[in-house]
Image (cartoon, grey):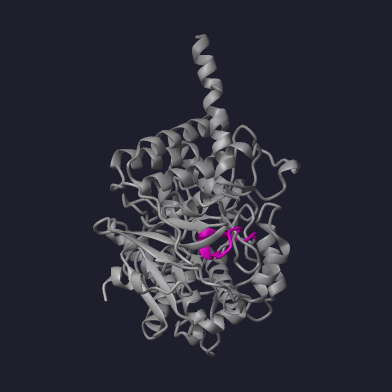
Amino acid sequence: MSHKEAARAQSPDHVVIVGAGLAGLFCALKLAPRPVTVISAASLGEGASSVWAQGGIAAAVGEGDTPEAHARDTIAVGGGIVDEAVAHRLASEAAGRIDDLLSYGVPFDRDLEGRLAVGREAAHSARRIVHVQGDRAGKAIVTALIETVRKTPSIKVIEGYSAEELLVANGAVTGLRLRSTANGETLALPARAVVLATGGIGHLYAVTTNPAESYGGGLAIAARAGAVIADPEFVQFHPTAVMIGKDPAPLATEALRGEGATLINGDGERFMLKIDPLAELAPRDIVARGVFAEIAAGRGAFLDATKAVGAAFAQKFPTVYESCLAGGIDAATQPIPIAPAAHYHMGGIAVDGRGRSSIVGLWAAGEVSSTGAHGANRLASNSLLEAVVYAARIADDIRRLHWQAPDSIASATKEHSSAPEKDLEARLRETMSTHVGVIRDADGLAKAIRVFGEIKATSESIALRNMATTALLVATSAYVREESRGAHFRSDFPKANPDFARRTMTTLSAARHVAADLVRTPSLAEVIGSLA
């Protein structure tokens, strides 16, 4: 059966999951034997950030560790705006979800006594990260889930299509409009229950560790349909992307610093010692700004594992070792050149404890969602945990629901679309990195907001207009938050402001109002320039 025939045969009471990373596949398996259709922009196993995850999954399964301690660490790094009840519940469900993954065939590392082996990562008070072959957790987990999905008859997979519009009637989801990534063909897919698991926004930035499919498309279509968006300004920059000229940039996992690797500049100085008492194990936002400052000062930044890991590098961290070797660096004997890169989005579609969005019939899981668990800064290896915890909750919620299928699918808009214009896409990504990146200020954000408006108005690509929509949501929320908190740092407001000690809840309409006001208001730089 072709994909077009499959779409025509789709029953509105089938659940549609958009995204085939960890959250999407796990949710599909948890919904079995209920009929589910999974939409994947790329072939299964490709295009999902979770496949690339190296660190592992945080879970209090080690001797002496507790979910309470895990929750405390999560809250401590979240910049004062973590939903504490969410954090405690997330940590308490971790062990159960690890058991689920083991049942699906995930080969987590074990110690000599057969117990789950656990490692330590930045800002964790205990060794609680479960790994697969050191740094291959994401790939191993998703590979195991794909094998199980292919053996599950209730799950149908449509590959090579991306979702470009969420169809809504009377405040409720009725379906999706899909577009082929190969030939631009469109499909209308009826659905009363849609789960968005489309990943993050890293590819909006010029330097990122995320695949090209992580461009904020899921967030954009939800926002365009009227969904509430939470905390979009909080973007985590991984401090140790490997700079060997690749896009996306390979990642040097946090676990390397957990094993004792140090951060040095071109003079060999451990610069993090003078920045934070935790040095290399400080929260990611602090480390990222430290690395950024060394690069900006012209001293460069490097991850040195030659003493802490040395000859064991290839065995302990094969993915990082192979990436470095491909770029001409022997990480066992040479420091690795690094830079901060857009890595994880704490913001996303606002969801409740069941994964429900503000639109009836729309759920979201994984990085496209915002649950309140991360606050202003994510604790290392909590992302994969959040993905499986909320995927399971969503499946449970959908199984309990009884609804009437829609009489008909809402009509999709007939928008012309072309491939993203390369020059406009490059301009958007450079603008995000320059003005909505590790360090921000009002003038730069205002400039970025104007650029995104221009791109949205001139591009003939729906995908690029969706990128501009998500970029606008990030930039306007960063502009409005006149303080520094967690991963959001404003050089013009470098301190936290108690008045902003709350989560952001916004909509596309609100973002457009901010943008419209800026268009009417010249920036300070423009005013000064006009007086010269």
Which of 511 and 226 lies nearest the eye of the viewer?
226
Q: Is residue 77 left or right of residue 422?
A: right
Is the residue 153 above or below the residue 191 in the image? below
Q: How many marks?
A: 0
> Can residue 44 be seen?
no
89 left or right of 461 in image: right
421 left or right of 519? Answer: left
x and y percent of residue 346 in the render? 57, 55
Q: Quadrant of the N terminus?
A: bottom left
Residue at image x 28%, y 47%?
Answer: 418
Q: Residue 175 is drawn in which quadrant? A: bottom left
Specify whether residue 367 is painted magenta: yes
User: Viewer-proximal residue, 207 or 113?
Assistant: 207
- Does 473 sit above or below residue 335? above
Q: Which residue is located at x 41 percent, y 39 percent?
A: 456
398 within the magenta span: no
Q: Residue at x 45, y 65 (%)?
A: 408
Residue 466 in sight here = yes
Residue occupying the far left of the picture: 183
Q: Place residue 514 in its image quadrant.
A: top right
Residue 180, position in %: x, y?
30, 60
Furthest toward the front, the residue is 407
Residue nearest the viewer, comparing 258 with 431: 431
Residue range highlighted in magenta:
358-372
Q: Residue furthest bottom?
A: 113
Residue at 57% x, 68% y: name it.
386
Q: Position of residue 298 (x, y in %)?
A: 43, 37
Residue 221 point in image, percent of width and height? 47, 53
Furthest residue in direction right, as rendered: 498
